[in-house]
Amino acid sequence: MNKQMQGRAAAEQRQESVTVLGLGTMGSAIARRLLGAGMKVRVWNRSPRRARAIAALDALALDD
Protein backbone atom coordinates (compact mmCIF):
# COMPACT_ATOMS: atom_id res chain seq x y z
CA MET A 1 0.00 0.00 0.00
CA ASN A 2 1.52 3.37 -0.99
CA LYS A 3 1.65 6.39 1.31
CA GLN A 4 -1.26 8.16 -0.37
CA MET A 5 -3.52 5.14 0.12
CA GLN A 6 -2.36 4.82 3.73
CA GLY A 7 -3.23 8.47 4.35
CA ARG A 8 -6.72 8.02 2.94
CA ALA A 9 -7.28 4.89 5.00
CA ALA A 10 -6.18 6.71 8.17
CA ALA A 11 -8.50 9.65 7.40
CA GLU A 12 -11.43 7.30 6.90
CA GLN A 13 -10.72 5.57 10.21
CA ARG A 14 -10.67 8.79 12.23
CA GLN A 15 -13.55 10.33 10.23
CA GLU A 16 -12.35 13.88 9.94
CA SER A 17 -14.83 16.55 10.95
CA VAL A 18 -15.61 20.08 9.85
CA THR A 19 -17.15 22.89 11.89
CA VAL A 20 -19.33 25.46 10.14
CA LEU A 21 -19.70 28.77 11.97
CA GLY A 22 -22.67 30.81 10.84
CA LEU A 23 -25.65 29.18 9.19
CA GLY A 24 -27.01 31.86 6.93
CA THR A 25 -27.67 31.17 3.27
CA MET A 26 -24.11 30.10 2.46
CA GLY A 27 -23.22 28.38 5.76
CA SER A 28 -26.32 26.20 5.84
CA ALA A 29 -25.78 25.18 2.21
CA ILE A 30 -22.17 24.26 2.95
CA ALA A 31 -23.16 22.25 6.02
CA ARG A 32 -25.81 20.35 4.06
CA ARG A 33 -23.37 19.53 1.24
CA LEU A 34 -20.74 18.30 3.71
CA LEU A 35 -23.31 16.08 5.42
CA GLY A 36 -24.37 14.76 2.03
CA ALA A 37 -20.74 13.89 1.30
CA GLY A 38 -20.58 11.80 4.47
CA MET A 39 -18.48 14.20 6.55
CA LYS A 40 -18.90 14.58 10.28
CA VAL A 41 -20.19 18.16 10.67
CA ARG A 42 -20.43 20.38 13.74
CA VAL A 43 -22.40 23.63 13.46
CA TRP A 44 -22.76 26.85 15.42
CA ASN A 45 -24.94 29.85 14.84
CA ARG A 46 -25.81 32.92 16.86
CA SER A 47 -29.44 31.82 16.62
CA PRO A 48 -29.72 28.28 18.05
CA ARG A 49 -32.84 27.64 15.93
CA ARG A 50 -30.79 27.46 12.73
CA ALA A 51 -28.24 25.15 14.34
CA ARG A 52 -31.02 22.82 15.48
CA ALA A 53 -32.42 22.67 11.94
CA ILE A 54 -29.05 21.43 10.59
CA ALA A 55 -28.60 19.15 13.62
CA ALA A 56 -31.82 17.41 12.59
CA LEU A 57 -29.88 16.31 9.48
CA ASP A 58 -27.29 14.51 11.66
CA ALA A 59 -24.88 17.38 12.45
CA LEU A 60 -23.75 18.19 15.97
CA ALA A 61 -25.02 21.59 17.14
CA LEU A 62 -22.55 23.39 19.40
CA ASP A 63 -23.64 25.63 22.27
CA ASP A 64 -22.20 29.04 23.10
Image: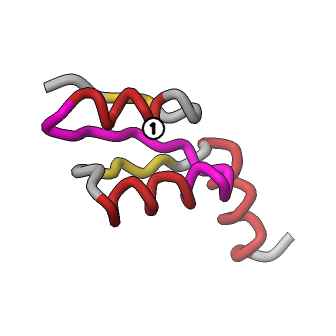
Q: Which residue corresponds to mark 1?
A: 54
Q: Is residue 17 above or below residue 5?
A: above
Q: Quadrant location of residue 1?
A: bottom right
For the residue marked with disc 1, what is the amino acid? Ile
Q: Position of residue 62 (x, y in %)?
A: 29, 28
Q: Position of residue 41 (x, y in %)?
A: 47, 43
Give the colouring mode of the picture. Answer: secondary structure
Q: Is residue 40 above or below residue 55?
A: below
- State the SS at label 1: helix
Q: Is residue 41 above or below residue 56?
A: below
Taking the spot 33% from the left edge, 58% from the top edge, the residue there is 27
Reply yes or no: does residue 37 show up in magenta: yes
Quarter of the picture containing the C terminus is top left
Q: Residue furthest right?
A: 1
Taking the spot 71% from the left edge, 74% from the top edge, the residue there is 3
The residue range painted magenta reads 34-47
Please state if 33 lies on the left or on the right of 10 as rendered. left
Q: Position of residue 44 (x, y in %)?
A: 26, 39
Reply yes or no: does residue 17 show up in magenta: no
Taking the spot 73% from the left edge, 64% from the top edge, the residue there is 6
Q: Is residue 62 above or below residue 35?
A: above
Please state if 48 lies on the left or on the right of 36 as rendered. left
Q: Residues within 10 Å of mark 1 (few under 14, many from 20)?
A: many
Please state if 24 lies on the left or on the right of 28 as rendered. left
Instruction: Work out whether residue 18 or residue 6 is closer to the camera in this orientation and state it.
Output: 18
Q: Residue furthest top?
A: 63
How many marks the image carries: the answer is 1
Taking the spot 33% from the left edge, 34% from the top edge, the residue there is 51
